[in-house]
Amino acid sequence: MRTYSNTAWWIIVAGVTLVAFWFGYGATERYYLQQLTAQNQSTLRLVSSGLQGSLLRYEPLTSLLADKADVKLLLSSPQDQDRITRVSEQLRSIAQDIDASDIYVMNSLGVTIAASNHEERTSFIGRNFNFRPYFQEAVQGASARYFALGTTSLKRGYYFASPVRSGEKVTGVIVIKIGVEEIENDWRGSGTEVIVADTDGIIFMASREEWLFKSLNPLSDTALTRIRTSKRYPIEKLSELQSEVTTSDVAGSAFTTITLADSSEAYLTNSRFMSDAGWTVHAMVPKTLADGRTLTALVVATLVVLLLLLIMTFVLQRRARLVRDIVAGARAQEQLELRVAERTNDLNIANENLTKEVAERRQAEQQLLSTQNELVQAGKLAVLGQMSAALSHELNQPLAAIKSYAENARTYLARNKAEQASQNIGHISEMADRMAELGSHLRNFARKPKQATEAIGFGTVIEGVKNIIGPRLKNENVTLNHSGFDDSLVVNAGRYRLQQVLLNLINNAVDAMSEMDNPVVTVFSEVRGHEIALCVRDHGPGLNETVSGQLFDPFFTTKGVNQGLGLGLSISYNIIQDFGGAITAENHPDGGAVFTVLLKQADQVEDAAE
């Protein structure tokens, strides 16, 4: 029984709503049409006032310009080129100030002798406009206004013309042309379409470009002949606008249906005649706006009624639901309290476990701190050992060279060869400088911050190395072949540190061939892209694959006892790393080992860095 009653209630509500909708549509539509008409009439007044203001703004300017002395003097001496240029520039400046399209001066025959666009490709100077009605009226002594399409610029504009007099005689005509595109741009996007038609019913201004040069009425042959003679509009573009006008229930309005291509649209139209210009201004707003507002209002009203009914139904149903919610809430409260108790117990257990874990971690931290202190002390001892070993290793080579140079110098002095002895003493001084710098080189082994690098040439580097290692090579009958070492090859490095690397590699190559007769060490360089490769090759037994991965580790050596500390390659590796380069080792296909140093190529040689 309850189901039947609810269904009947909703059927009655739906029927009443449909009847109210049907009878209320007409009244609601009429109301919105009246509102739309009032809005459209207001827009029409604004558009007409704007057009009228533009006409009143520019009309007196032509008379003022016609009285200018320079314009009158130009018409009296039209061959004066300096005056033509001066007047044209004045007109161009005035046109910019008043936002005019063009200003130009014509003589009594209609030939333009000065124009604001005199520097443009479409300059009016030299063109004859005597066929224009505005010229024909102005040359007779009256001010004239005219709307037309420019024959030169092909732009629409409104022309204001005034005669230029010399006494009582009309010597020429001055014209101001105003463009209409900006006025049309202001109309677009407002929701209201605007068209302006002349006395022949031709649309020459419109908010929609496709309506331009359309005729609201059929054109007579006389009108077409007049338009063709005055070149007012392009004849080929003139056509009749497909429109149908019907009366409206709202006073002062009409319905205009315009058809373009395959689509048509109805507009609520209000018109106003501008007697001064002979124009008719039409403001047209789409009728669909009123239809949409009407439909929206009725839909909203229907939704409001339905909403009220739904609220009533909701209130009635909510009372019954409230009792059920109270019972369900009580049950949920009990379940919630039970879950809270369980969760609290879990949290207590977790807190106890966390407390134990914190205590264990604190004990572990104490042990870790103690271990770290012991490791620091051990590290200090290891660093001291590495520093002393590295210093001993690096001082051996310069000391050996100093001893050799000193013996040679003593021999030269005994033979009264003072110049050769002086050279050897100079080499001893260089070795002393090198030993003074060894302390700073030890930080390369510890990977300290980088020293400065400079652009240096390879020629300087190889000469220093030959001076240091020369005595050993001579004593052990070792041949040193080198190529590609000149100052045209420039890298970013430090001279003494690069010499140290090359010296270590050559000494290692000599040591690798200690068992050979007539050993040969080959040193060469080559350009590889933006890098330069420095290669040192020996002809010994080559590298063992099992130890090749440890070559650059500190204190690793393949030599016998008391034959090396294993620091040379490690120090060299760190020096090249500081230069931003790389050092590799591999076996040569023809035998022996090749150590390759890759360094970045520099632009020019600078003062050498150490």
Image: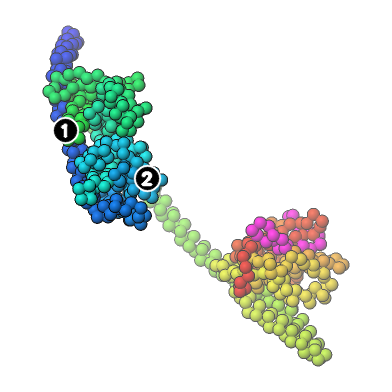
Image quadrant containing the C terminus: bottom right
Secondary element under disc 1, as helix, strand or loop, is loop
Residue 301, located in which quarter of the rendered image?
top left
Residue receiving disc 1: 275
Residue at 29 percent of width and 37 percent of height: 132
Amino acid type, callout 2: Gly
- Disc 2 packing (10 Å; few <14; some 14–19; many ≥20): few
Numbered tag placed on residue 603 in the rendering: none
Residue receiving disc 2: 126
Image location of residue 217, percent across then percent down: 26, 22
Q: How is the image coloured?
A: rainbow
Residue 349, located in which quarter of the rendered image?
top left
Residue at 26 percent of width and 24 percent of height: 216
Image location of residue 18, percent across then percent down: 17, 14
Image location of residue 494, percent across then percent down: 63, 70
Q: 533 above or below 112?
A: below
Image quadrant containing the N terminus: top left
In 3D space, how far apart are the residues under numbered discs 1 and 2 (Cα atoms)? 35 Å
- Sequence-wise first label, 1 or 2: 2
- Disc 1 packing (10 Å; few <14; some 14–19; many ≥20): few
Amino acid type, callout 1: Ser
In the rendered image, residue 542 lying in the magenta stretch gets the answer yes
Q: Is residue 288 visible?
A: no
Q: What range is drawn magenta here?
A: 525-546
Work out whether residue 143 or residue 168 is closer to the camera in this orientation and state it.
Answer: 168
Q: Residue 79 vs residue 535: left or right?
A: left
Residue at 77 percent of width and 89 percent of height: 418
